[in-house]
Image: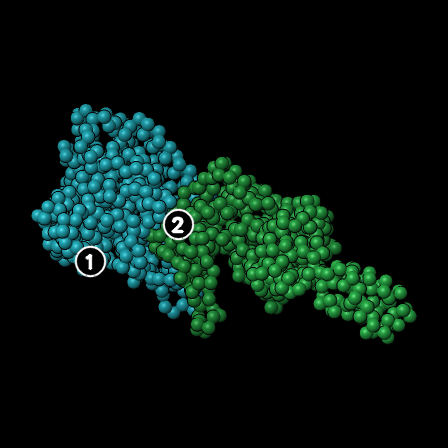
């Protein structure tokens, strides 16, 4: 393997594909075939766990006929999109990269995928991930680790690492990931992509296998801000199958990109640039902030007083929810069941012992512990209080600013195996990203350059709940003018 | 029981009669083929999410209003976590520290006294599935799971430990069932499990306030079993205490066949359910206006209706009690009385002929074939002396099987009562002539023979003679 293999250059934006296909200038079948051959070529990156070869070609053929017949087609016509393997697609396995869901075939399709399909997107396959989205490197996968196309000895980040690799290496035009504590933004940062963690409730979770229900959001991973805006546009909006989805109108995100960002007031949490942050990232982001200021944007130093408790609160609350969400994988109804158990309890124990990987078991145990009688108040309740304080911090700050700019990750992509034996260090990869999951507001990562060894650096932009427009406008401006 | 007082609280689960399940659109019906009424949500498939059925919430609130509870305008669901094969998500969506209803009460009557029973809370939750072992199609040493029942809406009604006697427990449970049925939110069928009852029981020395260790009794699927199980458990605890022992905190399963309760698990084996707020459901809010609307929609409740029947219709308590047992029976009574203002006559016929038909046919008033208006017509003929009560019963039997009105039947069956004295006298004379020996015996003091003569005359008149006139004339003739 070539350690410095670059990502495949972007051939076409989503909008360009849609236009070309609608005009008859691009044959959907040939378009899909080119991505299928990329997938075969990059098999070593271990990005896909299922490739929907026949169905994607059939869908492309159908679309091609529609175009020939002059039938109007959707906003994602013929675009080739991958989905993370924790998002359900009828008739295909949903494994969450876990042995325990071995042989499980989903009988239904997630709302987000339905919405993309309704716009004539073509689902090319399902991508590798950290088991049940628990991890920051895509190493915790029953399929083995995915590799970063910038340097195949390095991780692509996680947990949506397979989705990030699929897009970065040109095996899909865009992908859906899920973000519970940074699982879209961190891999986006590690692979030079744009990744959005929408406001909690912006996008339906129906059909997304739950890790931590009050944190999880599905979001896009794309090459550009415009692609991300288009995809977000399609998947957003109220879903009657998800009570936590918000009945709030979806603005025209693409249109909002073109508006000038002058009026945006930018907050920079200076405190975050001190400990544990790599110098390359720190320098690059400081440089960007200076440019923004010199371009006439208002930049304000802000403080998030409770942010330092974010990681602790996150790992208590998210594991508590996970311990309950993962209780259904017991070998009784579907998926893996261990052999040789003498009774029901032993069957549960053996199945879950053999079916779950170490990180998942670690989090189930942690989550079970913090909810247990006698510990609930000290851990779960306390963490809920911290979560509320962090929300209050943001509420106060967003009264005076529009967007927050900060690093996505403390380091660029690390080496495969480097942090595997040190869970706490791995958890600290999420230090900048968990805050917006705790607060429930929106955030995204865009590429803002490379470090000294040519690894991508992510810039994180955050905005208040349902203010994706502001965040996208700033991201688009930076992408166009400053990177 | 002289030394000890029983402290009893009941936890009652009632399945709600909603069209669909509590968190999905699957049909909420009993008796389908296994696993037929299921979907990704109630199967707990990966990625599926619950959405609250507002109708189930309204039913819960109605029960709260009918039992004098405070209704929460904001309430949340919680997850109750435990592993069991019939619980596909590994947790039950229930309510914990913020139930929809709290702080209510009911007044029960038992053996002529009244007692106020506090209701701690009523909360909403989903039912679990069923393990199937004893059907023909299940192989030996195998359990199959039927998840049809998963997601059936339940309310759990938790009483305060205010019950002191097994009979009071049954009276309370019967009253709850009656209210649920009046509200038409639960069919109350204990055998099918749509109404289920667990009991918490402890004993304390009479005259003291220190509570003893309590045990929980489960698996009592009839009123009779509730009573028997509580009696059993009181005796069991009493024997332990009298022997100087300590009652161990435990959950016991009632075995109706063996007439005993067996310990299922002790405190050490008790579950830690690790309740926490259900993140998949947003807190739900109910406006005061909505609560007021629901309150206005409540029917007259059984105890109120019973008192009103006693006052308005001057019925004995016994009658009022029976007539108001179900809302439909009470409705039937009032519909007949509306046509015919003879409450006691109507009551007698309902408690007699109609309930007999219901019992014999194992049916209920909703399937009783005679419309109230026709029942009133029949009883009106009786009240007007157009027919006698034997004739009325004959007509009643015909009405059960035909569409004919009482008036038509009276004529067709020739049952109209004859009060014409000349005609009746004519028959009497013929009968006396035919039975000289009996006439002589009567006149020699054998008074009881009057019945014989009445019967003969009645038969000769084909049952149509007015019995009062007949008897009077007959006595006069015999005295001559």
Q: Residue at x 28, y 38 (%)?
A: A250
Residue at screen point 30% across, 43% down:
A203
Q: Nearer the viewer, residue B108 or A177?
A: B108
Disc on res. A55: 1
**Image-based side of B173 in relation to B448, left or right:** left
Q: Quadrant of residue A100?
A: bottom left
Chain displayed in green: B
What is the chain letter for disc 2?
B
Marked residue chain, label 1: A
Q: Is residue B135 left or right of residue A239?
A: right
Which quarter of the figure has residue B442?
bottom right
Asked whether A386 or A276 is in front, the reply is A386
Q: Residue at x 19, y 39 (%)?
A: A225
Q: Are marks 1 and 2 in contact (CB under 8 Å)?
A: no
Quick check: B151 above or below B436?
above
Tell me the element at label 1: helix
Taking the spot 12% from the left edge, 48% from the top edge, the residue there is: A21
Q: What is the total number of numbered labels drawn onto the structure image? A: 2
Badge 2 local density, few (<14 within 10 Å), some, or many (20+)? many
| Depth check, front residue: A216 or B38 | B38
On screen, residue A277 versus residue B9, left or right, reads: left
Residue A61's spot in the image, x, y percent? 15, 56
Q: Residue B366: percent from the left, percent from the top?
A: 56, 57
Q: Dot 1: few (<14), some (14–19), or many (≥20) neighbours within 10 Å?
A: some
Residue bearing the label numbered 2: B50
């Amino acid at each position: 393997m070539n350690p410095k293999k670059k990502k495949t250059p972007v051939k076409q934006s989503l909008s360009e594909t849609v236009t070309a296909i609608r005009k008859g200038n691009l044959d959907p079948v040939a378009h899909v075939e080119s991505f299928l051959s990329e997938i075969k070529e990059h098999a070593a990156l271990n990005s896909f766990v299922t490739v929907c070869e026949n169905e994607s070609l059939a869908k492309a053929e159908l679309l091609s006929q529609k175009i020939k017949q002059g039938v109007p087609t959707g906003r994602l016509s013929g675009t080739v999109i991958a989905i993370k393997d924790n998002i359900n697609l009828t008739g295909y396995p949903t494994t969450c990269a876990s042995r325990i869901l071995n042989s499980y075939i989903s009988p239904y399709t997630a709302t987000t995928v339905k919405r993309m399909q309704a716009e004539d997107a073509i689902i090319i396959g399902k991508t590798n991930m950290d088991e049940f989205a628990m991890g920051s490197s895509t190493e915790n996968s029953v399929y083995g680790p995915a590799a970063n196309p910038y340097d195949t000895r390095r991780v692509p980040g996680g947990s949506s690492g397979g989705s990030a690799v699929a897009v970065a290496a040109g095996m899909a035009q865009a992908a859906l990931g899920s973000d519970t504590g940074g699982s879209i933004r961190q891999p986006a940062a590690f692979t030079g992509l744009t990744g959005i963690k929408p406001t909690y409730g912006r996008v339906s979770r129906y059909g997304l296998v739950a890790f931590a229900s009050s944190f999880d959001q599905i979001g896009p991973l794309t090459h550009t801000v415009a692609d991300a805006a288009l995809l977000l546009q399609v998947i957003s909006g109220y879903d009657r199958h998800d009570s936590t989805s918000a009945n709030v109108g979806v603005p025209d995100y693409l249109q909002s990109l073109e508006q000038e960002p002058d009026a945006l007031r930018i907050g920079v949490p200076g405190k975050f640039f001190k400990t544990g942050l790599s110098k390359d990232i720190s320098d690059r982001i400081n440089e960007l902030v200076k440019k923004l200021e010199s371009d006439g944007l208002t930049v304000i130093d802000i403080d998030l007083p409770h942010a330092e408790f974010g990681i602790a609160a996150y790992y208590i609350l998210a594991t508590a929810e996970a311990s309950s969400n993962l209780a259904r994988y017991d070998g009784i109804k579907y998926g893996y069941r261990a052999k040789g158990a003498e009774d029901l309890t032993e069957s549960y124990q053996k199945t879950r012992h053999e079916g779950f990987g170490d990180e998942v078991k670690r989090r189930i145990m942690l989550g079970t512990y913090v909810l247990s009688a006698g510990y609930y108040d000290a851990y779960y309740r306390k963490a809920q209080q911290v979560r509320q304080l962090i929300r209050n911090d943001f509420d106060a700050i967003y009264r005076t600013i529009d967007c927050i700019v900060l690093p996505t990750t403390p380091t660029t992509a690390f080496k495969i195996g480097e942090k595997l034996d040190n869970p706490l260090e791995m958890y600290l990869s999420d230090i900048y990203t968990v805050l917006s999951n705790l607060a429930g507001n929106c955030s995204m990562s865009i590429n803002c350059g490379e470090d000294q060894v040519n690894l991508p650096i992510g810039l994180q932009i955050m905005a208040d709940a349902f203010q994706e427009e502001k965040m996208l406008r700033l991201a688009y401006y930076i992408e166009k003018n400053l990177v | 029981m002289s030394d000890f007082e029983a402290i009893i609280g009941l936890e009652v689960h009632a399945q709600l009669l909603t069209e669909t399940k509590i968190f999905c659109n699957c049909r909420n019906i009993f008796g389908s083929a296994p696993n037929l009424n299921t979907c990704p949500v109630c199967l707990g498939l990966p990625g599926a999410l619950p959405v609250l059925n507002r109708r189930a919430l309204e039913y819960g609130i109605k029960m709260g209003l009918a039992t004098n509870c405070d209704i929460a305008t904001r309430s949340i669901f919680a997850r109750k976590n435990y592993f069991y094969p019939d619980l596909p998500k590994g947790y039950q969506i229930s309510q914990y520290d913020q139930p929809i209803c709290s702080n209510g009460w009911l007044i029960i009557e038992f053996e002529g006294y009244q007692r106020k029973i506090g209701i701690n809370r009523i909360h909403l939750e989903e039912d679990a599935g069923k393990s199937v072992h004893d059907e023909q199609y299940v192989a030996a040493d195998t359990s199959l799971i039927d998840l049809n029942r998963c997601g059936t809406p339940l309310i759990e009604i938790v009483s305060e430990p205010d019950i002191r006697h097994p009979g009071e427990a049954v009276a309370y449970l019967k009253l709850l069932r009656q209210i649920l049925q009046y509200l038409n939110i639960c069919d109350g069928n204990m055998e099918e499990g749509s109404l289920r009852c667990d009991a918490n029981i402890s004993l304390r020395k009479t005259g003291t306030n220190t509570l003893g260790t309590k045990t929980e009794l489960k698996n009592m699927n009839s009123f009779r079993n509730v009573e028997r199980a509580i009696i059993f458990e009181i005796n069991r605890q009493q024997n332990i205490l009298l022997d100087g022992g300590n009652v161990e905190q435990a959950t016991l399963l009632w075995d109706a066949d063996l007439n005993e309760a067996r310990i299922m698990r002790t405190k050490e084996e008790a579950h830690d359910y690790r309740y926490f707020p259900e993140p998949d459901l947003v807190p739900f809010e109910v406006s005061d206006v909505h609560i007021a609307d629901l309150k206005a929609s409540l029917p007259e409740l059984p105890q109120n209706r019973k008192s009103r029947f006693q006052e308005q219709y001057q019925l004995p308590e016994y009658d009022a009690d029976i007539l108001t047992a179900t809302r439909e029976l009470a409705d039937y009574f009032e519909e007949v009385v509306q046509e015919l203002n003879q409450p006691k006559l109507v009551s007698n016929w309902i408690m007699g002929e109609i309930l007999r038909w219901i019992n014999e046919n194992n049916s209920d008033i909703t399937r009783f074939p005679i419309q109230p208006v026709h029942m009133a017509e029949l009883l009106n003929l009786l009240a007007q002396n157009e027919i006698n009560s034997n004739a009325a019963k004959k007509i009643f039997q015909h009405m059960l099987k035909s569409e004919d009105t009482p008036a038509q039947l009276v004529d067709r069956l020739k049952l109209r009562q004859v009060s014409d004295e000349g005609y009746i006298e004519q028959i009497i004379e013929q009968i006396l002539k035919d039975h000289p020996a009996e006439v002589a015996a009567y006149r020699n003091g054998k008074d009881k023979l009057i019945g014989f003569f009445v019967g003969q005359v009645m038969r000769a008149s084909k049952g149509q003679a007015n019995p009062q006139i007949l008897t009077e004339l007959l006595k006069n003739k015999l005295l001559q």
